[in-house]
Image (cartoon, grey):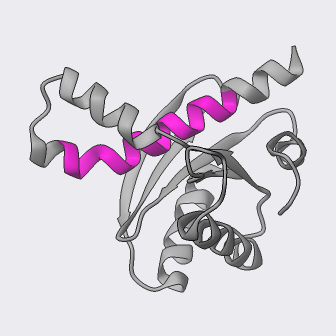
Amino acid sequence: MSETFEQQAAAFGASGALFGLDLGDKTIGVAVCDPARMVATPVETIRRKKFMADAERLAALAATRTISGIIIGLPLNMDASEGPRAQSTRAFARNLARVLPLPIALWDERLSTVAMERDLIALDTSRAKRAEKIDEMAATFILQGAIDRIRGLRS
């Protein structure tokens, strides 16, 4: 996946619901947008198990929501270089593409979790609730940024 986000996103077509994923070591935050790709909303946080179990859960969610593509947050370093987490994300995307026949695009997610943590603190959300919701909120932030970019490409 050496293409740009814009090249990857072209495979999504003009409309259809998309998933946004925030991959963590222990969880996967999942968000979805409406078919018109206007608003991203949180779906759930998947507790990571083995890859195939995670992929099966994502496939089940994708089937029930008629998903046409997946955007995965790519955790680049602040200088835009790729470290071990970005390489792990790329490997997850490659493996997922083999078992879930949907186009996948990678979105620069720098600071998404930090931004969502700040928003949840501003809303006076308890530490326990923040820990429970942070991954799906980060996925929502990632997806919203990506669909805003996709809409900008069409105008």
Report x, y in % for residue 36. 70, 26
- Left or right, residue 141 beside residue 37: left
**Residue that extends furthest to the front in the rendered view of this protein:** 79
Residue sitting nearer the eye, 18 or 135: 135
Residue at 67%, 75% (x, y): give it.
Answer: 91
Task: Look at the image and say whether residue 142 sits in the magenta stretch.
Answer: yes
| Residue located 58% across and 38% down the image | 143
Above or below: residue 139 compared with residue 59? above
Q: Considering only vertical position in the picture, is 54 above or below 81?
A: below
Q: Is residue 145 left or right of residue 137?
A: right
**Place of residue 54 in the rendered image (x, y in percent of width and height, measured from the top left):** 49, 75
The range drawn in magenta is: 130-147
Above or below for 127 versus 150: below
Main SS of the magenta segment? helix
- Residue under the image location 75 percent in, 71 percent down: 97
Q: Residue at x 61, y 30 (%)?
A: 145
